[in-house]
Image (cartoon, rainbow, N blue to C red):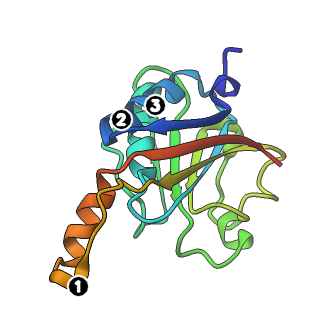
Amino acid sequence: MTGIEQFEGRREIASPDDMEALGRELGAVLTAGDLIVLTGPLGAGKTTLTRGIGAGLGIRGPVQSPTFVIARTHPSEVGGPPLVHVDAYRLGSPAELDDLGLDPDNAVTIVEWGRDMVDGLVDTWWELEIERGWSGTGVDNACGTTGHYAAELEDAAPRIVTVTRRP
């Protein structure tokens, strides 16, 4: 296997640097026409993974979350396909995603929060689900530990990334 198929299945990612490294590995094998749907809770590492994919593709950056602009196109600096990075969080339906006028056949397209949004856009795609792990350190807020501390502990926990071909 030479494409994204080699990544199918589950893997544990220990750190943000490892998440970005996985993205670089993915970016090195993605080609025009590949569409990736990234799912996972806030702070799971979707944009970090996309930053790595952009580096693997050799695109002009920086890759940042497109939350407020909905979609960003990053042209290639090495003659490859552009990266189209979409944040579907604020979109209400697949029709709104379609209204963006994306050209998934001629780009690598990443759609964060895209579950149940890309069915009519392409025939098949890859879903990468990122689960936030639990660090196992425990938090006892009865003694005054703040929620901010709990968030830091959770951020240090490993992630589980599952790569699945859809539909």
Residue 165 sits above or below residue 2 on the image = below
Residue occupying the point 58% across, 22% down: 29
Q: Is residue 161 above or below residue 102?
A: above
| Chain-order first, disc 2 or disc 3 | 3
Q: Position of residue 103 (x, y in %)?
A: 67, 47
- To which residue does mark 2 refer? 60
Q: Considering only order in the chain, which callout, 3 or 1, is on the residue closer to the N terminus?
A: 3
Q: Which residue is labeled 3 in the image? A: 22
Please tell me whether residue 55 is drawn above or below residue 101 in the rendered image. above
Q: Position of residue 92 (x, y in %)?
A: 64, 79
| Residue carrying label 1 | 142
Q: Nearer the viewer, residue 28 or 156?
A: 156
Q: Is residue 129 left or right of residue 57?
A: right
- Label 3 neighbourhood size at 10 Å, few (<14), some (14-19), many (20+)? many
Answer whether labels 1 and 3 touch (C-beta < 8 Å).
no
Give x and y (percent) for residue 8.
Answer: 68, 32
Say whether residue 76 is visible: no
Q: Residue 131 vs residue 15: left or right?
A: right
* Label 1: few (<14), some (14–19) or many (≥20) C-alpha neighbours in 10 Å: few
Which amino acid type is shown beneath numbered disc 1? Answer: Ala
Residue mark closest to the camera, 1 vs 3: 1
Q: Residue at x 33, y 59 (%)?
A: 154
Residue type at numbered disc 3: Leu
Q: Earlier in the sequence, mark 1 or mark 2?
A: 2
Q: Is residue 155 left or right of residue 11?
A: left
